Amino acid sequence: MEERYIRNLGALTEQECAALRTKTVFVAGCGGLGGYLIEMLLRLGVGEIHAADGDAFEASNLNRQLLSSPSSLGKPKAEAAAMRAELVNPDVRFVAVPQFVTEENAAELIRGSDAVLDALDNIQARRTLARACAEAGIPMIHGAICGWSAQAAVVMPGDDLIEKIYPEGVSLSSKASLSFTPPFCAALQIALCTRLLTGRPLETGRLYMADLLDMELESLF
Amino acid sequence: MIEVRFFATLRDGRGKITQVPAEEASTAGDLLRRFEIPPEEVAILLINGFHSKPENPVKDGDVISLFPPVGGG
């Protein structure tokens, strides 16, 4: 085993670490959640990461987005993700796609992935991604944040969790987010993703909702 | 009494838990109106832990949980 993964041992077996190195993960979004998801996947040691985001950094991203810095303002988020990947773990094959997830490209973007991580920032794109995952038979690990709150869930093909948590007519009224909410949510997602990719027992279709203001973790459904 | 539990931003100005006399609400939607919560600001509505809708009836002893949409990334 490569020395850089030695501290994974004890928490993961050597076989699990080797299995992770064979996995491909798609990350939808390279913003608040996506930046931390990519960082954690790179250090955990998956084999291949594909990450898509059509956006560029702006100053309001700086309070929470790991890949952003004053010098990156105006630059594509996907490009910053590729640079970070090369810096942190060049042994992970990294494919950056400077595109938003749409009805037209979703199926192609996720093709061949063992898991899809939801780091999107709007309900419509999440519905699109969830439909594409269901059709392709790929598990989706949902994550979302608002203010002090974070939620995460494993959505297996056929689960209707996304329809349950984003019913028709519901709207996002707040864009607030703090520096610590995205990494907390990303950690929940990567813990679930690691269990999924290593074949460990996993309760799917359950929504984990954390409130960092009141220090509560609810498990719904 | 009906117990109403608020989560995340729905706690602002309402607290975590409150009790409502059963005769003052016949549906979950009555409770939303009572606490001035627009329906589009409730993503998940549980009655006794079961996924429900505003038109679903509520009765004495029920526990209603209300979660706002969390959708940022």
Image (spheres, rainbow, N blue to C red):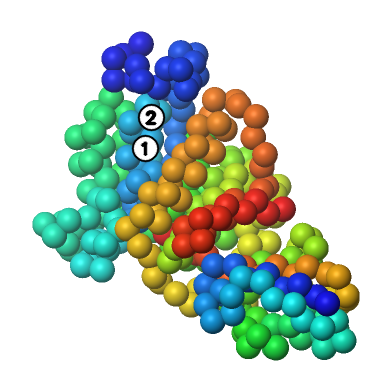
Horizontal side, residue B5 vs residue A183: left or right: right
Q: Which residue is mark 2?
A: A44
Same subunit under labels 1 and 2?
yes
Horizontal side, residue B19 vs residue A144: left or right: right
Query: Is residue A28 something that shows in the picture?
Result: no
Horizontal side, residue B63 vs residue A162: left or right: right
Q: Amino acid at mark 1?
A: Met
- The image quadrant that residue A71 belongs to is bottom left
Dot 1 alpha-carbon crowd within 10 angstroms: few under 14, some 14 to 19, many 20 or more: some
What's the residue at 63%, 88% (across, down)? B36
Query: Is residue A3 something that shows in the picture?
Result: yes
- Who is closer to the viewer here, A81 or A201? A201
Dot 2 alpha-carbon crowd within 10 angstroms: few under 14, some 14 to 19, many 20 or more: some
Residue A202 horizontal/vertical position (percent): 64, 35
What's the residue at 57%, 32% (across, down)? A196
Q: Chain of mark 1?
A: A
Determine contact: label 1, label 2, CB under 8 Å. yes
- Who is closer to the viewer here, B65 or A214? A214
- The image quadrant that residue A95 belongs to is top left
Q: Chain of mark 2?
A: A
What's the residue at 66%, 72% (across, down)? B17
Residue A83 horizontal/vertical position (percent): 20, 41
Residue A106 horizontal/vertical position (percent): 49, 52
Q: Vertically, is A24 above or below A129? A: above
Query: Residue A30, which numbered label?
Result: none
Q: Which residue is mark 1?
A: A40
Q: Amino acid at mark 2?
A: Leu
